[in-house]
Image: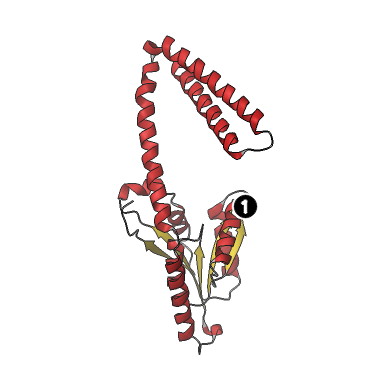
C-alpha cells in the first residue's frame, strides 16, 4: 500500500505543478515568469520521482495505477460530458426570455381588474441560478397568484452576484430576495425564512414550488444533489405550507 500511496501523491503533485504552470503562463500576471518556472520545476521534479517509483516498485503494486487511472479518467470525463450537456440544455435563450415576458404580460392583462389585496396565497420559489427550470417554475407560480417571490440562499458571494446580475439583465419582474447563509446551512436558512413569512400572518397558505430537473436517464440522478427532496421532507409536517414540484424534462438526450 505504501508504494501505491506514494505513486498517487507524486502523480497528484505532478499534475498540480504542471497545471499551475500552464495557468500562470496563460494568465500572465506580474510575476508569471517566476511563478511558471517554480511550478514547472516542481511538476517535473515530482514526475521524475514518480517514474523512479513506478520502475522500482512496479512488481510491488505500482502496476495497479496503470489500470485504475485510465478507468477513473474515462469515468470522470463521461461525468463532465453529462454536466456540460445539461448546462447547455438549461441555458436561457433569447426566445425563452421573450416567451417568458409575453406570458407574464398576458397574465397581468388578465388580472388588471383584480385587487391584489384579495390574494391570500403566497408562493416561494427557491432558486440557485436563472435557467430554463427556474423560468418554467416562475411562469407556473405566477399563473396561480401575483404574490410570487424567488428566494436565493446566498452561501457563495460570487454565485449571489451572478444571479442578481442575471435577474437584472433579463429584467425578471418577479422579485428576488437574498437570504444570507454565512455558514452554508442552505436548507436551515431557507426554513428560517419560511418561518418568518408564516409568522407574519398575512397569508392563508404559503406554497413552496421547487424547480426540479428530471434527467432522461434515471441513473443521472446520482449526479445531482437532493436539496429539493430534503426541503420537501422538512416541510412535510408544516400545516400552512404546501410543497409543489415543477419538473423540467430536457429536450435532448444528455
- Quadrant location of the N terminus in the rendered image: top left
Number of marks in picture: 1
Q: Quadrant of residue 154?
A: bottom right
Q: Name, please, the residue furthest toward the top.
A: 56
Residue depicted at 60% across the width and 66% down the height: 196
Element type at mark 1? helix
Along the line of sight, which residue is nearer the eye, 99 or 156? 99
Colour logic: secondary structure
Residue depicted at 39% across the width and 56% down the height: 89
Q: Is residue 243 visible?
A: no
Q: Residues within 10 Å of mark 1 (few under 14, many from 20)?
A: few
Q: Where residue 54 sits: x, y (%)? A: 43, 15
Residue depicted at 48% across the width and 74% down the height: 101
Q: Name, please, the residue furthest toward the right.
A: 30
Q: Where residue 24 sits: x, y (%)? A: 60, 35
Q: Where residue 30 sits: x, y (%)? A: 69, 37
Q: Where residue 184 sits: x, y (%)? A: 58, 49
Residue pointed to by mark 1: 157
- Relative to residue 155, is residue 95 depicted above or below? below
Q: Is residue 55 visible?
A: yes
Q: Quadrant of residue 91?
A: bottom left
Say whether residue 55 is left or right of residue 193.
Answer: left
Q: Name, please, the residue furthest toward the bottom.
A: 113
Q: Quadrant of residue 117?
A: bottom right
Residue depicted at 53% across the width and 25% down the height: 13
Amino acid at each position: 500500500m505504501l508504494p501505491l500511496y506514494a505513486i498517487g501523491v507524486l502523480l497528484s503533485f505532478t499534475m498540480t505543478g504542471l497545471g499551475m504552470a500552464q495557468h500562470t503562463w496563460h494568465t500572465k500576471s506580474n510575476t508569471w515568469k517566476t511563478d511558471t518556472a517554480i511550478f514547472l520545476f516542481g511538476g517535473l521534479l515530482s514526475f521524475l520521482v514518480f517514474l523512479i517509483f513506478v520502475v522500482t516498485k512496479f512488481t510491488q503494486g505500482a502496476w495497479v495505477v496503470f489500470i485504475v487511472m485510465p478507468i477513473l479518467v474515462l469515468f470522470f470525463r463521461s461525468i463532465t460530458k453529462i454536466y456540460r450537456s445539461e448546462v447547455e440544455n438549461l441555458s436561457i435563450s433569447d426566445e425563452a426570455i421573450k416567451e417568458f415576458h409575453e406570458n407574464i404580460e398576458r397574465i397581468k392583462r388578465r388580472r388588471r381588474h383584480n385587487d391584489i389585496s384579495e390574494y391570500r396565497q403566497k408562493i416561494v420559489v427557491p432558486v440557485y441560478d436563472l435557467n430554463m427550470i427556474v423560468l418554467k417554475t416562475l411562469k407556473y407560480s405566477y399563473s396561480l397568484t401575483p404574490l410570487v417571490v424567488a428566494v436565493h440562499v446566498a452561501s457563495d458571494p460570487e454565485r449571489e452576484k451572478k444571479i442578481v446580475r442575471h435577474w437584472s439583465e433579463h429584467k425578471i419582474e418577479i422579485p428576488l430576495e437574498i437570504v444570507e447563509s454565512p455558514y452554508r446551512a442552505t436548507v436551515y436558512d431557507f426554513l428560517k425564512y419560511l418561518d418568518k413569512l408564516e409568522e407574519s400572518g398575512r397569508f392563508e397558505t404559503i406554497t413552496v414550488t421547487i424547480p426540479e430537473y428530471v434527467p432522461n436517464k434515471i441513473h443521472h440522478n446520482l449526479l445531482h444533489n437532493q436539496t429539493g427532496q430534503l426541503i420537501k421532507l422538512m416541510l412535510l409536517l408544516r400545516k400552512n405550507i404546501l410543497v409543489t414540484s415543477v419538473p423540467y424534462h430536457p429536450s435532448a438526450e444528455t
